[in-house]
Amino acid sequence: MADDQRDLRILIALLVGVFAIGIAIFGVVRGTSATGPGSGVRLQIEIAPPLDPRAVVLATRVVKERCDEKGLDTRVVSGGDRVIAELGEDDPVLVDHVASVIERRASLEVRGPDGMVVLAGDRIAGAEVASGGVKIGLRAPAAIPSGAQLTFVLDGKERGRATVDHAAPTDFHVRTEGASEDAALRAAAELVPVIEAGAVPALRVTERTPFTRATGFFPRAWPFFAAGAVLLLVAAFVAFRRR
C-alpha cells in the first residue's frame, strides 16, 4: 500500500512538473514574440460589408501598409469583422492624420483596349503576384476577355498595363510588361498594391483608446516563470513528502 501511494505521488509530481515546464516554455515564447509599441493609441477600424475572410485579410494588409507610410511603430491585427491598429504615438494631430489615411478611399478603374471600364475596384476581392504576373480574384463573376490589354487607372492616373492570359468566372491572370523578366516581375509587384488600394472595402475608425503594455523579454515572461517555479515546488513537495 505504501509503495502504491508513493508511485501515485511520483506520477502526480511528474504531471505537475511537465505542466510547469510547459508554462515556462510559453513564457519564453511570449517573451521573445513581437509586442508592438509599448504605449500609444489603439484604433478600432470597421470594415464595410459584405464581409468575408478575403476582405478581412485585404483590409488588414492595406491598413498596415497605410500605417507604415508614416514610419510609426505600429502593430496591426485582424479582430473578426474589424482591424485593430496600435500606434506608438499619442499626438492627437498625428493620430487624426493616420486615421484619415486609413479611411482614404481610392477609385480604381480597369479599362479595356477601347478605354471603356470593364471592371471597377469594388468588384475585386484581392490580388497577388503569381506566374510572372498578377492573379486577380473577383467578388462575383465577370466577363474578362482573354488576350485583352488592360489599363489600371487609380484616382484618374494610369498606374500600369497588363495583358490577360487566363480568365475564369471568379478570377483572371494578367501578364505585366517589362524589358526583361525581372522588370516584368517588378511591374507585377508594383501593380498589386495599386489594385488592393482600389479593392479594399470602405474603412472607418470607430474608436480610439490609449493603451500601455509591458515590452521586453523579462517583463512579459516573468509571470509565467514564476507560475512554473511555484508548480515545480508543488511537484517536489508531492514527490518527497513522507506521508
Image: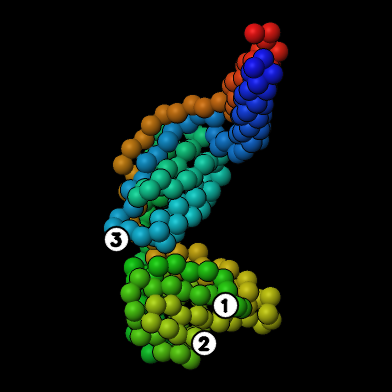
Crowdedness near tag 1: few (<14), some (14–19) or many (≥20) residues, C-alpha within 10 Å: many
Label drawn at residue 50: 3
Q: Nearer the viewer, residue 232 or 23?
A: 232
Q: Nearer the viewer, residue 84 or 242?
A: 242
**What residue type is disc 3 on?**
Pro
Q: Nearer the viewer, residue 81 or 232?
A: 232
The answer to whether residue 223 is above or below residue 174 is above
The answer to whether residue 118 is above or below residue 125 is below
Q: Are marks 2 and 1 in contact (CB under 8 Å)?
A: yes
Screen quadrant of the N terminus: top right
**What residue type is disc 2 on?**
Asp
Crowdedness near tag 3: few (<14), some (14–19) or many (≥20) residues, C-alpha within 10 Å: few
Q: CA distance from mark 1 to mark 3?
A: 28 Å
User: Closer to the N terminus: mark 3 or mark 2?
Assistant: 3
Q: Is residue 4 left or right of residue 61?
A: right
In the picture of the structure, the residue carrying the numbered disc 1 is: 133
Q: Nearer the viewer, residue 70 or 20?
A: 20
The quarter of the displayed image where residue 52 is located: bottom left
Residue 229 at least partly seen: no
**What residue type is disc 1 on?**
Gly
Q: Is residue 21 left or right of residue 45?
A: right
What residue occupies the far left of the structure in this picture? 49
User: Closer to the N terminus: mark 1 or mark 3?
Assistant: 3
Q: CA distance from mark 3 to mark 2?
A: 29 Å
Q: Please tell me whether mark 3 or mark 2 is closer to you in this view.
A: 3
Crowdedness near tag 2: few (<14), some (14–19) or many (≥20) residues, C-alpha within 10 Å: some
Q: CA distance from mark 2 to mark 1?
A: 9 Å
Residue 114 at least partly seen: yes
